[in-house]
Amino acid sequence: MAMESPSPYRGYVEHDGVLHCEGVPLPAIAEAVGTPVYVYSAAMLRAAARRMKAALDGLDDPLIAYAVKANPNPAVLHVLAQEGLGADIVSIGEYAHAVDAGMAKDHILFSGVGKTREEMEKALTGGLLQFNIESIEEAHDLSAVATAMGKTAPVGLRINPDVVAGTHEKISTGQADTKFGIPGEQAMEAFRTARALPGLDVTGVTIHIGSQLTSLDPLETAFTRLGEVIRALRHDGCDLSLADLGGGLGVDYGPDQPDPPSVEAYAAMVKRVTRDWDIRLAFEPGRSISGEAGVLLARVIRIKPGAKAPWLIVDAAMNDLMRPALYDAYHHIVPVEPRGEPASYNVVGPVCETGDTFARRRIMQRVEPGDLVAFRTVGAYGAAMSNGYNSRPLAPEVLVDGDRWAQVRQRVDLAEKSAMPLPDWLEN
Ligand SMILES: *Cc1c(COP(=O)(O)O)cnc(C)c1O
C-alpha cells in the first residue's frame, strides 16, 4: 500500500509495509532511542532550501535567512548552513546557534520586539547584517548601546502594514493591534528619528505578517504597501539597500487542510511586486524550510473506550508537540506499520489536561497497543516549543541522512535534581 508522502521530496516512504525516513526504517530509531522522538530528514531540508533558492533565481543576490526559532537544532542548522542559508534570529542564544552552525555573520538578521541591551551588545560585538528594529524606543536603546561601544549598528525598521493574514490569531503579526513593528503611517517619522540617531546606520525596511499563510493575497497587499513606503522614504532622502520580506509561507499539513501556495508561486508574486524596487531582497522562511522534514514518533500506550470514539493514548503529549493545544493545529497521524483497516480515535497524550488532545474522532488506520505512530509535518515549531510540563523529559531528536542516522539531541531530563537545588534550610 502506498503511503502519501510530502511531494516532491519523498523523504518519508513505506517499504515492505514499514514507514522509512529516507533509507532508515523508523522502528529501528524508536527501538534504539526510545519514544517519543523527533526525526528529521536531511534530504528534505536540503530539498526545501534548494527549491526556494531555485524559485528566487533571477533576483539580485537574495538572502534566505532561515528563521531559527522554527527548529534550532544544531544539526538542522548545519545542514541549512551547508546550503548557504543565513539566519533570522530572535535571541542571542539563536545567534550563537547560527554562528556555531557556520552561518555567515553577514547573513544574520536579528528580529524581535524585546532585544535587551545585553543582546544588542553581544550581537554588535559578534557582527551581523542588520538589526530589525520594531519601535523607536528600541532604536534609541540600540543607538545608545552602539555609541557607547564606539560602533554603528546597521538597522532596518519593521513596518506593520496592517493587513489581516488570514491565519490563526496567535500567529498573525501584521495587524495594527499586535505588538509588532511600526505602524505604516508613522514610518516616515520613525525613519527620520532613527536616521538622526548617532549610533545607527539605517539601511533597510522589513515586514512579517504572520505564519502558516495559505493565500498569497495578504502577502501581496503587505509587499505592495511596503513598496509605497520604500518609494516615500527614498523621496525623503533615505538610502535603502535591503528590503526584508519576512517569512510566513504555509506548508501542507495533510488531507482536507488548506493547500498553501507553492514557493514558485510565492517567488513569482514577489518578482512581480518588487520588479522596480531596485533593492536587495531578504526572506525569513522557517516553517516552509523545516516543517515537512520532521516527524514525531510515538508509541501507543493503550486504547481506552470512549463515549464517541476510543481514546488512543500515545506516549507523546502536548509538552512534546504544543501546536494542537496552542493553535488547534492539525497534524496528520499515520501508523508506522499500517494494518490497513480504518478506525476512528481521539488521539491523546498522558498529560493531565483535556488540552492534551492531538485529534478528535480522527479517521486513521487501526492500531494496537505497542504500535508506533508518526505525527507528520512537525519539523517546525515542534521540538522547538517542547517543554517539561508534567515533569516529562524533552524528547530526543534524530537526523537521518540517506542510510545514516544520529541522535542530535539527548532526552533532556528537566526533573534532574542538580538543576533544581533545594535551599539548605529545606533539606532534611
Ligand atoms: C516566526 C518568524 C519568521 C518565520 O515564520 P514562518 O512562518 O516559520 O516562515 C520570520 N520572521 C519573523 C520576524 C518571525 O517572527
Image (cartoon, rainbow, N blue to C red):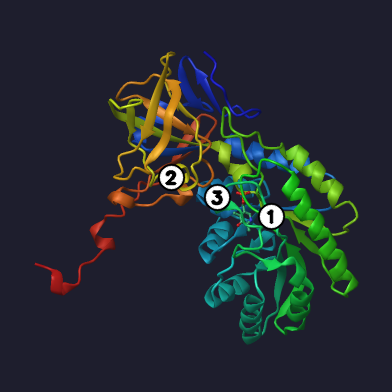
The amino acid sitting under disc 3 is Ala
Residue furthest front as drawn: 307
Q: Is residue 5 visible?
A: yes
Q: Assess mark 1: CB under 8 A from ligand 1?
A: yes
* Whether residue 71 is situated above or below residue 183 in the rendered picture: above
Please tell me how crowded label 1 is: few (under 14), some (14-19), or many (20+) other residues with Cα within 10 Å: many
82 and 157: which one is in front? Answer: 157
The amino acid sitting under disc 2 is Ala
Give residue 209's quadrant in the image. Answer: bottom right
Disc nearest the viewer among 3 and 2: 2
Q: Assess mark 3: CB under 8 A from ligand 1?
A: yes
The amino acid sitting under disc 1 is Gly
- Write down the residue under mark 3: 70
Q: Give the numbered dot on residue 325.
A: 2
Quadrant where the C terminus is found in the figure: bottom left
Please tell me how crowded label 3 is: few (under 14), some (14-19), or many (20+) other residues with Cα within 10 Å: many
Q: CA distance from mark 1 to mark 3?
A: 13 Å
SS category of the residue bearing label 3: helix
SS category of the residue bearing label 2: helix
Q: Give the numbered dot on residue 246.
A: 1
84 and 143: which one is in front? Answer: 143
* Whether residue 337 is situated above or below residue 168 in the rendered picture: above
The tag earlier along the polypeptide, 1 or 3, is 3
